[in-house]
Image (cartoon, rainbow, N blue to C red):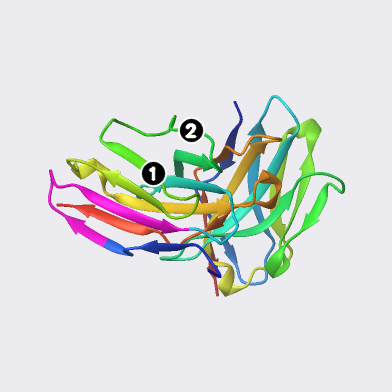
Amino acid sequence: GAGVSQSPSNKVTEKGKDVELRCDPISGHTALYWYRQSLGQGLEFLIYFQGNSAPDKSGLPSDRFSAERTGGSVSTLTIQRTQQEDSAVYLCASSPSSNNYGYTFGSGTRLTVV
Amino acid sequence: AQSVTQLGSHVSVSEGALVLLRCNYSSSVPPYLFWYVQYPNQGLQLLLKYTTGATLVKGINGFEAEFKKSETSFHLTKPSAHMSDAAEYFCAVSDRGNNDMRFGAGTRLTVKP
């Protein structure tokens, strides 16, 4: 597509429930990133996919968080047993293989855990 | 590992005044440097980037930034602020050859009429 698409744009869930956030990157972009932006905070790196390589999961805050990328395109970030501290905006970005192009970001998914 | 420090979480200027948003980085190798802007309820948009070559880079909306290796800085400037410039600005650094980009905490720019 023309840009990075994220869905849903807003998600309200009850504490303890599982949620799935979707990211559809720009066609042809081999790199895909997930970041978390909490209120008044900067961007926290979560996970990075590059082509068919094993993902860099070093930023995932706990084992309740996982992500996959199917067919080198769409990615799903899953949060199990959500907690109130998971409330944040989750941003997805993609880029061509080289990092000197910068990232193209989606509009994010605002997750609220009640 | 690389890191970024943005001095001032909130900057307020009058319309028509100079905009200066500060960014200092830490990197063990020559970095790639970026500025992004985030308007309310939107994702981040690339303003400008430095990868190699000229150290003064020009971006969209009249913004520019200068890479100063001796000061490990990449400050963002605009000669004359416009009301539409009000947004959150993020500085980011990435080691060359490494797709891991680290962001600063952001600076919220307010423009007063």
Would you name the residue on which mark 1 appears?
A68
- Position of B54 with respect to A57 (left or right) is right
Q: Amino acid at mark 2?
A: Asp
Q: Amino acid at mark 1?
A: Glu
Residue A112 forms part of the magenta stretch: no
| Cα–Cα span, label 1 and label 2 | 11 Å
Query: Which of these two is toward me, B22 or A3?
Result: A3
- Position of A59 with respect to A105 (left or right) is left
Which of the 4 image quadrants contains residue A83? top left
Position of residue A44 relative to residue B79, above or below, is above
- Element carrying mark 1: strand
Position of residue A73 relative to residue B104, above or below, is below
**Residue name at image x 49 percent, y 43 percent:** B105
Would you name the residue on which mark 2 appears?
A56
The label nearer to you, 1 versus 2, is: 1
Give the mark nearer the N terminus: 1 vs 2.
Answer: 2
Q: How many marks?
A: 2
| Residue A91: x %, y % from top left | 43, 53
- Element carrying mark 2: loop
Any part of residue B104 in sight: no
Query: Which of these two is toward me, B24 or A36?
Result: A36
Position of residue A108 relative to residue A82, above or below, is below
In magenta, the rendered stretch is A11-24
Determine the chain carrying the residue at label 1: A
Any part of residue A28 in sight: yes
Q: Give yes or no for contact between labels 1 and 2 (Cβ–Cβ under 8 Å).
A: no
